[in-house]
Image (tube, rainbow, N blue to C red):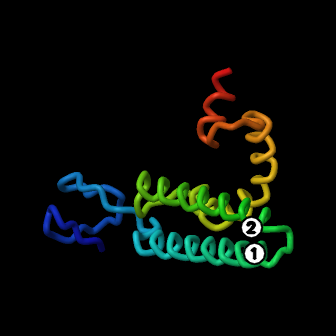
Amino acid sequence: MAFCPRYNGEIGVVEPVCPQCGYDFPPQNAPSDLDARAALRSAIKDGGIVSGVLLLLTSLMLDGGTTFGLCLTASLGYWAGVGMALLRRGTSPTTTDLLYFRWGSLALTCASPCIATLVYAIIGRSERSGLGRLLYGMLM
């Protein structure tokens, strides 16, 4: 027996739609909003831990801060991406969002030396500021 809130009565048959009034019952095995929030909270927490460990390990390297600077830049980019995804999707992230929240910091940290080399090849050496050199290199 099922209870229809719109018809305000019991129905003898359990169906996805009430035969009396046409009310659509929610699916029984649909993920709840609490599950999505817990998964989101867990993924962001894991991403913060990964980001913090990477920053700690790169700060201990004796290379004059070059690797730490790359990791810090990647971490800032990662958190900017997390913020944009949260603004766009709110509390209902996709599976790809959760994957990015959990492991995006590691991926960006690994990719940042290649990205930095590419950017440096574009802007080269100049007396202009960093942003000025980047814009000049892209336009010319």
Q: Is residue 30 above or below residue 45?
A: above
Left or right of 19? Residue 123 is: right
Left or right of 55? Residue 16 is: left
Name the residue tied to disc 2.
68
Quadrant of the rendered structure where residue 100 is? bottom right
* Image marks 1 and 2: residues in contact by CB distance under 8 Å: yes
Q: Cα distance, mark 1 to mark 2?
A: 5 Å
Q: Which mark is residue 59?
A: 1
Left or right of 85? Residue 25 is: left
Q: Looking at the picture, how far across and down is residue 140, in whole percent? A: 68, 21
Q: Amino acid at mark 1?
A: Ser
Quadrant of the rendered structure where residue 81 is? bottom right
Q: Is residue 64 above or below residue 17?
A: below
Question: Residue at point 79% right, 64% down?
Answer: 67
Q: Secondary structure at mark 1?
A: helix
Question: Residue at point 36% right, 58% down?
Answer: 16
Give the quarter of the figure containing the N terminus.
bottom left
Q: Looking at the picture, how far across and down is residue 73, in whole percent? A: 65, 58
Q: How many other residues sit within 10 Å of disc 2, few (<14), some (14-19) or many (≥20)? A: many
Q: How many other residues sit within 10 Å of disc 1, few (<14), some (14-19) or many (≥20)? A: some
Q: Amino acid at mark 2?
A: Phe
Question: Residue at point 26% right, 58% down?
Answer: 18
Relative depth, front residue between 5 and 124: 124
Q: Secondary structure at mark 2?
A: helix
